[in-house]
Every structure is written in structure tokens, then in C-alpha cells.
Image (cartoon, rainbow, N blue to C red):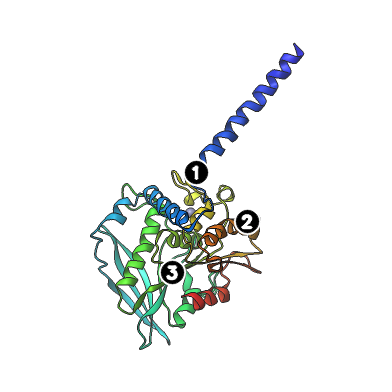
């Protein structure tokens, strides 16, 4: 009798746990990148990008031959020593307009590089230009260096249109910023980058991954694993089907072989975007860059600060690669 009870406890103690672990192992991260030839890497990227666009509910937007016209209208213009700031409204979809900021250098040069600058939670399109902030005014610093900058809002938590999802709308608005940049004769279409911190670092990851028109990506205060994001974090990062398909190293791997810099601060709290997890994730990302024989195109900056932009490293990276 005693043995039967012990057996009962063992079976019912272990069995449910076993099922749970097995189910997770089978179902999560089905598209984890596995190192292979350059051709394998390219094939994997094309397939995964297609699957992710479907999860984003963006199939119709990216396959539409006729994108809505940009339809820019200038709301405000401000003059600075080296550049002009314009506040505009453009069409994101055929039924929705978004507000953006663009800075245009006062130079006679043409063919200028441009950077999409992205703020995080609780901030807006102005925040990346503010010196006294976790962004250290990186967009303003780029603007001073004869780089066109553009910024839109991605911090909303409501979905604007039926049959869309939040992350899809955020990404699409940033892709429309790229469309707008490419419509300007002053922009060198082959030299467009993106950068952001926190949710902005997450959106820079998504923009760099999904939009191959981006040449250089700086993703700050974000590189980590999804298990970490399940704890003590706003859950707006998650959407149906995402975890079953990938983890963050796989998404960043879509950027290869294009230029990527990740930044993580030593003073991040243990629940935040710790360098330890970031370095682990970067090791995984490196494998696709190695398959492309472009391992020098990806780097991680571990800096002394906390959840903030490492300004000089960001500026240097764009100077070198954009
Ligand atoms: Zn959120």
C-alpha cells in the first residue's frame, strides 16, 4: 500500500510537469536560425520575413502595388543654426495620417544620408531630440552632422484600424517614414539607417529586420530574450504566433549581413536589458553574420550607463557605416 502511494505521488508529481516542458520544447522558436551556407541563410531570411509579415497582419500592405501617396502637409517649420525642423503629416495608410518630424541640413550638398530615430515607452517623436533625456539628444546630434533625421510616434497602445495589430501598425508607420525619405530628392536612398532605445530599440530591430532598405541599425537598451520580457515588462512586444516562431536573436539575424550595433548598459537592473543576456544573444546573432562572412558588420557596445543611449558609439557607428 505504502509503495502504491509513493508511486502515485511520483507519477502525478512528475507527469504534468513533464507534459508542460515537452510542450514548450516542441512549440517554441520553431524558426530558430541554424548555421549553414550563405544561400541557406538567405532562404531562411526570406521565409521568416514572409511569416512575420503575416503575423503582423501586414500582407496586404506590403504586397499592395499601389501604396497610398505620401501626401505631406507641413504643420510647422523651425529654424536652427545648421538645419531646419519641419513638423509634417503624411499618409500612413489610405485612411490614416501620422505626424512626423524631419530635420533637413542647411547644406548645398545632395545625396545625404538619413536616420529614422525612435523613442520608447512614455515618450514621443520629440523625445529623441531632447538633450536632457535617456536619448541624450542623439537625433539632434545626427541632425547637426548633415544627416537627415525623421521621427514618428510608436508609443501608442491602441490599435487604429480594424484587422491590424499594434506592433504591425507601429512597424508600418516607420516603414512609411522610409517611403517618405526615399521620395525626397535630397536623400541618398542607399544610405538610410535607424536607431532607437528601449521600445525604440525594439522597433529599430523590427525595422532593420523587416525593411531591407535600412543599411545601418542601432538598437539600444533592448537586446535580450523573450523569457526575460515575460517578466516585469509591458507586454506590448508580444503578439499571436511570435514566440512559437522565434526569439530575439532570430529577429536580429534578419538584419544580416547589413550593419548592426546593439547597446546595453552595465547599470541595467537585473529585470532589464542586462549585458549578460545581450552578449549571449549576440553570440547567436553572430552565427548568421559568419555564414555571410561579414562578422565585422555586427557589434555590441557594453557601456557604463543604464537604460540610455551611448551617444558617441552611436555617432561613430553611423559615421563609419552610413
Ligand atoms: Zn508597451
Given residues 134 and 218, the one toward you in this image is 218
Q: Which residue is drawn at the image coordinates 72% and 16% (left, top)?
A: 5
What label sits on residue 30 in the rendered view?
1
Viewer can see residue 235: yes
Q: Position of residue 277 (x, y in %)?
A: 63, 55
What crowding class fits label 3: few (fewer than 14 Cα within 10 Å), some (14-19), or many (20 or more)?
Answer: many
Residue pictured at 41% horizontal, 77% vertical: 113
2 lies left or right of 271: right
Q: What element carries label 1?
A: loop
In what quadrant of the picture does the N terminus appear? top right
Circle 3 is placed at which residue position? Answer: 215
Query: Could you tell me residue 148's position as x and y percent?
Result: 40, 77
54 up-or-down from 124: above or below: above
Label 1 packing within 10 angstroms: few (<14), some (14-19), many (20+): some
From what the image shows, is residue 200 above or below residue 141? above
**Can you give x and y, in whole percent of width and height, for residue 78 in the image?**
37, 81
The mark that comes first in sequence, 3 or 2, is 3
Q: Foreground residue, 64 or 72?
A: 64
Observer-nearest residue: 296 or 148?
Answer: 296
Disc 2 CB within 8 Å of nearest ligand 1 atom: no
Q: How crowded is mark 2: few (under 14 residues within 10 Å), some or many (20 or more)?
A: some
| Of callouts 1 and 3, the N-terminal one | 1
Q: Which residue is painted at 48% across and 58% down in the image?
A: 38
Sequence-first disc among 1 and 2: 1
- How much space separates mark 3 and mark 2, taking CA atoms? 24 Å
Q: Is 54 left, or right, of 315 in this rendering? A: left
Q: Distance between the residues labelled 1 and 2?
A: 19 Å
Residue 149's place in the image compared with 81, above or below, is above
Say which residue label 2 marks.
280
Does label 3 point to a residue whose CB lies under 8 Å from ligand 1?
A: no
Answer yes or no: disc 1 within 8 Å of ligand 1.
no
Q: Is residue 158 visible?
A: no
Amino acid at each position: 500500500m505504502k509503495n502504491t502511494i509513493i508511486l502515485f505521488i511520483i507519477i502525478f508529481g512528475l507527469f504534468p510537469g513533464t507534459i508542460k516542458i515537452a510542450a514548450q520544447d516542441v512549440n517554441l522558436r520553431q524558426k530558430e536560425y541554424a548555421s549553414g551556407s550563405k544561400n541557406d541563410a538567405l532562404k531562411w531570411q526570406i521565409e521568416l520575413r514572409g511569416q512575420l509579415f503575416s503575423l503582423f497582419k501586414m500582407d496586404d500592405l506590403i504586397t499592395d502595388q499601389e501604396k497610398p501617396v505620401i501626401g505631406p502637409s507641413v504643420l510647422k517649420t523651425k529654424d536652427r543654426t545648421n538645419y531646419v525642423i519641419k513638423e509634417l503629416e503624411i499618409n500612413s495608410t489610405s485612411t490614416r495620417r501620422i505626424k512626423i518630424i524631419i530635420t533637413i541640413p542647411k547644406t548645398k550638398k545632395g545625396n545625404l544620408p538619413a536616420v529614422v530615430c525612435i523613442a520608447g515607452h512614455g515618450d514621443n517623436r520629440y523625445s529623441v531630440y531632447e538633450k536632457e533625456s535617456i536619448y541624450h539628444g542623439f537625433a539632434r546630434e545626427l541632425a547637426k552632422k548633415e544627416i537627415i533625421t525623421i521621427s514618428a510616434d510608436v508609443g501608442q497602445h491602441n490599435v487604429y484600424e480594424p484587422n491590424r495589430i499594434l506592433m504591425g501598425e507601429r512597424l508600418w508607420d516607420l516603414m512609411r517614414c522610409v517611403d517618405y525619405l526615399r521620395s525626397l530628392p535630397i536623400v541618398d536612398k542607399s544610405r538610410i539607417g535607424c536607431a532607437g532605445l528601449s521600445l525604440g530599440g525594439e522597433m529599430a530591430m523590427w525595422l532593420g529586420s523587416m525593411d531591407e532598405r535600412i543599411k545601418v541599425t542601432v538598437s539600444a537598451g533592448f537586446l535580450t530574450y523573450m523569457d526575460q520580457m515575460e517578466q516585469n515588462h509591458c507586454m506590448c512586444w508580444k503578439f499571436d504566433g511570435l514566440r512559437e516562431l522565434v526569439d530575439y536573436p532570430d529577429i536580429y539575424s534578419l538584419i544580416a549581413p547589413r550593419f548592426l550595433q546593439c547597446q546595453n548598459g552595465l547599470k541595467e537592473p537585473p529585470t532589464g536589458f542586462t549585458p549578460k543576456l545581450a552578449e549571449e544573444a549576440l553570440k547567436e546573432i553572430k552565427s548568421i553574420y559568419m555564414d555571410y562572412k561579414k562578422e565585422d558588420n555586427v557589434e555590441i557596445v557594453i557601456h557604463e550607463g543604464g537604460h540610455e543611449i551611448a551617444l558617441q558609439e552611436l555617432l561613430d557607428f553611423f559615421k563609419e557605416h552610413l
